[in-house]
Image: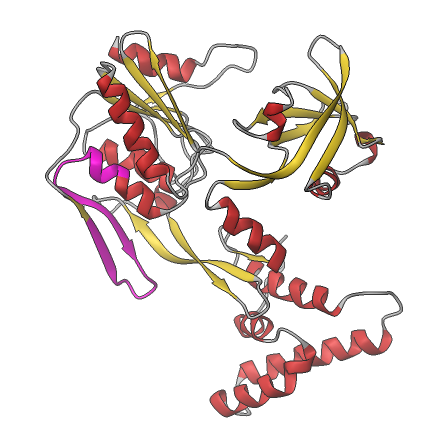
Amino acid sequence: MRKKYPLGLTIALMLITASATFVISLLAIREHYGMNSDLYGEVQKYQEAREVIQKYYVGDYEESGLTDASIAAAVDALDDQWSFYMTSEEFEAYQKNLNNQYQGIGITYSRTEDENYVRIETVSDGSPAQEAGLKAGGIIKDIDGQNVQDLENEEVRELILSQIGGVVTMTVMDEKGSERTVEVESKEYYVNPLSYEMLDGDIGHIAIANFDSGSGQEAIAAIEDLLDKGAKALIFDVRNNGGGLVSELLELLDYLLPEGELFITADRDGEEIITTSDSDGLEMPMAVLVNENSYSAAEYFGAILQEYDWAMIVGAKTTGKGRSQITCELSDGSAIHISSKTYYTPNRVDLSEAGGIVPDYVVELEDDSDTDLQLEKAAELFR
């Protein structure tokens, strides 16, 4: 069970960033809230706990680690899965990810069934892993001489990132059981969030990995290229799309939809901002592919097109993330990513309350099939 913390303690922990600033902070709180305020007492309690640790704890620890853990616990106490705390290093990486810049080798992975090794699940286009010839389904047995059986998943990640600017050497076994030694650069790299192709029947298939910086224009450019090549229908693939920037989502929706309301955000006081589309739109057969890993902007993309009766939704039910977050940088370069607004569709649907999008055509993938049944179903609708 997740431990709950009083709101006063939550605020207090976020205010106190180091014991050296305690006196100044306490005086400021007393001046603003008064000696008898709950917040004043909570801050005092926090300092007392720090002093107990400093005076009696027998082990080694870092002062900054206590502060990071305290703020992380405070944000966690909000019981909102979309709000979280980032250290300065994590925040720096987060900012790069918003521009589709990443660090490492460019794979996602999971443990094998026997827990002994690591299976490569995906390889990012344009990543060092792709350049080195790694493929999904490959089994990583060791990294830089360390057997992955002895490493936790997070330790695998840390080992790869520790070689940024260098080379990671790993033993990889393919699906046929053949082993080879692979050297992969661990570095910063850019991943294009969008790819597209023309399917049989003049159907354009546009896969959007996220709605981070540049994705709106990339998607519009892909649409226009497909139209020039004779596309008669479009399939937008936002499966496994974790969302991104609302501005990128709205840029694409404005291009696709006719005049009308596009999107509504409301702050904690219920104050609404309504975004509208101009009179230009793209009217042609469309479908949107979604699944349980389509979040936030990806979900609203499908839901809004569905409300306009502009596209059919195919795939699996989505999660339902109807909250907007802001990222507030703290004085030491760390940051708090916190839910600050609620999203609504033009029909005032909150996908968090609705529990996500229910597709017009529910299609589950089969684990033992090499056929993308969801994509096939969407294409079949147009053929």
Count the numbered circles shown.
Answer: 0
Residue shown at 34% from the left, 54% from the top = 342
Q: Where does the C terminus fall, quadrant-wise? A: top left
**Residue 320 x, y percent position in the rendering:** 40, 41
The quarter of the picture where residue 282 lies is: top left
List x then y, in percent, for residue 3. Answer: 63, 59
Tell me where residue 367 appears, x and y as whole percent: 55, 15
In this picture, residue 371 sits left or right of residue 63: left
Q: Residue at x 59, y 68 (%)?
A: 332
Residue furthest right in the image: 58
Q: Nearer the viewer, residue 52 or 190?
A: 190
Residue 312 appearing in the image: no
What is the basis of the colouring in this image? Answer: secondary structure
**Residue drawn at (27%, 37%) of the image:** 252
Verify whether residue 302 appears in magenta. Answer: no
In magenta, the rendered stretch is 252-275
Residue shown at the point (62%, 19%) measured from the top left: 135
Residue 288 can be seen in this image:
yes
Q: In the rendered structure, does residue 272 fall within the stretch colored magenta?
A: yes
Front in this rendered view, residue 325 or 142:
142
Q: Nearer the viewer, residue 79 or 245?
A: 245
Q: Is residue 129 left or right of residue 33?
A: right
**Left or right: residue 165 compared with residue 351:** right
Among the 4 quarters of the image, the one containing residue 106:
top right
Say which quarter of the image contains residue 182: top right
Up/down of 71 relative to 38, above or below? above
List x then y, in percent, for residue 291. 43, 28
